[in-house]
Image: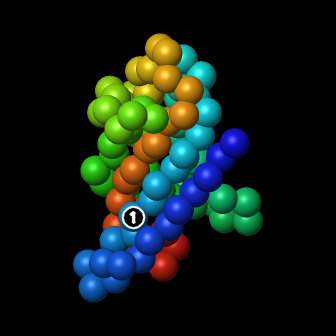
Amino acid sequence: MLHYQIEFDDYRQHLIHVTLRFLANPNQVLWLPTWIPGSYLIREFSKHIEAVKAYDEAGRILNISKTEKNKWRLFNTDHELITVEYDVYAYDLSV
């Protein structure tokens, strides 16, 4: 199961709020690509990600850390349904 919710309520600030719910593996790694097919530029999409937070099914905050420029590790051991929230600064149309 993978569920995304995207909100663009703060359009004047060019912020998109993303909520992601999924069944996680222990020590789940989340990552974004650095390029897209048809483009020969490194896009670095992750540089636009802000305020990353993770919660278990009871709403308790989980430890999530950025381990590389485009990867985050979620340190969960016994939680299955995880919610990850983050904001995307989307001023540039290529984001």
> Which residue is outermost to the bottom?
12
Q: Residue at x 54, y 45 (%)?
A: 21
Could one spot residue 47 in this view of the protein?
no
Q: Is residue 54 among what the camera can see?
A: yes
Residue at image location 30% in from the left, 78% down from the top: 10
Residue at which label 1 appears: 17
Secondary structure of residue under mark 1:
strand
Q: Amino acid at mark 1?
A: His
56 vs 85, nearest the viewer? 56
Q: As displayed, is residue 87 above or below residue 73?
A: below
Quadrant of the rendered structure where residue 88 is?
bottom left
Q: Residue furthest right?
A: 38
Look at the image and tell me in which quarter the N terminus lies. Answer: top right
Q: From the top left corner, tell me how far across and down residue 2 is, in percent.
A: 65, 46
Picture quadrant where residue 22 is located: top right
Above or below, 65 against 12 in this view is above
Up-down relation of residue 56 to residue 34 (above or below): above
Answer with the quarter of the image where residue 89 lies.
Answer: bottom left
